[in-house]
Amino acid sequence: MVFADEVRADQLKGTERYSPYRVFSAAEWAGFRADTPLTLSEDEVRRLSSMYEPIDLDEVRRIYLSMSRLLSAHVEAMQLLFQQRRAFFKASAAMRKTPFIIGMAGSVAVGKSTTARILKELLNRWPSSPKVDLVTTDGFLHPNEVLRDNNLMERKGFPESYDVGALLRFLSGIKSGRRNVRAPVYSHLTYDVIPGEFIEIDQPDILIFEGLNVLQPRELPRDGTFVPFVSDFFDFSIYIDADPDLIHHWYITRFMRLRETAFRNPQSFFHRYSQLSEDAARAIAEGLWHNINLKNLRENILPTRPRADLILRKGADHRVEEVALRRL
């Protein structure tokens, strides 16, 4: 019984006997940057950040430069392994290495998008000048028409609201080294997939794949049939973490700010909320949080946190306070 209790202990505590992670304070983590150069200016960081997910140059120095150095080591190790496998299989020298894919997960409003954009720019500026692309899972949501037909509009963002087949075909194409693999495009203005619109991802060196549930496993068949997970295609995974009460606050704050900005556009799916009183709009936001986003976080997103290679734990000001790195 004691053994079972120990196994169920919080694996993000570095003192836990069975933790697969090493846990560092932000100050400790910042020390791992070594001589990694800061290649972004204050203006560039401000442009890549947002009023809802603020990151400043000091945060890039504290957290992101060490991340960049760590990922550089992982990419170099993967390239070395590729060369060794090519020799092992006596493969042609023309055999092309496959892209290094970074999966990024976390709740709505936790700051995934800003983190992904900052990381993309840092990786782009490595001395080797790799080609780095960023794709989000939003475009792989089923269109609203399909969600309505299946009574899933209130489950938008939950695992069942995505076209998992399209997700797997896209990642398989990328990992196979295919050229011009298409990803559907999503509009946050209309809150829907844009019919017939795609972006083409053409053999990147690194792909950042960001979304709520990218670390979500699927139910395994009892007969042992192979069932691929989205995360099977990742070479490294990151989870952006924060206390749910903080995320709740960030979500409501963002909603109320959008009500004064983007929601005022008559073409916005949420335009009707800009016409409400502040109290009525806040009540709507609270309902959306508790009935959809918090439920998704508890049921689907947070349970995938222990599957990540790197966990960034944020504090009240959106600054990372703790970093957990999976042991090798």
Image (spheres, grey):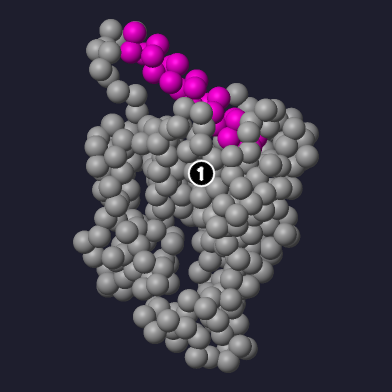
Residue at the spot x=24%, y=12% of the render? Answer: 92
Q: How many marks?
A: 1
Where is residue 314? Give x, y as percent: 69, 52
Q: Quadrant of residue 185?
A: bottom left
User: Of helix, strand and loop, which mostly describes the magenta segment?
Assistant: helix
Q: Is the C terminus in the top left, top right, bottom left or bottom right quadrant?
A: top right
Q: Is residue 221 above or below residue 83?
A: below
Bounds of the magenta segment: 65-87
Q: Looking at numbered disc 1 in the image, what kind of residue is underneath it?
A: Glu
How would you rate the neighbour count of disc 1 (Cα within 10 Å): few for under 14, some for 14-19, many for 20 or more? some
Where is residue 310? Give x, y as percent: 60, 38
Residue at the spot x=41%, y=53% of the render? Answer: 136
Q: In which quarter of the image is residue 217?
A: top left
Is there any visible trace of residue 9 in the rendered image? no
Q: Residue furthest left?
A: 196
Q: In this view, does 170 lie above or below 293?
A: above
Question: SS for tag 1?
Answer: helix
Residue at the spot x=51%, y=69% of the render? Answer: 292
Where is residue 125? Give x, y as percent: 51, 36
Q: Does the magenta stretch include residue 56?
A: no
Q: Is the N terminus in the top left, top right, bottom left or bottom right quadrant?
A: top right
Q: In this view, does 152 lie above or below 16?
A: below
Q: Quadrant of residue 55?
A: bottom right
Where is residue 173? Give x, y as percent: 27, 38
Closer to us: 193 or 213: 193
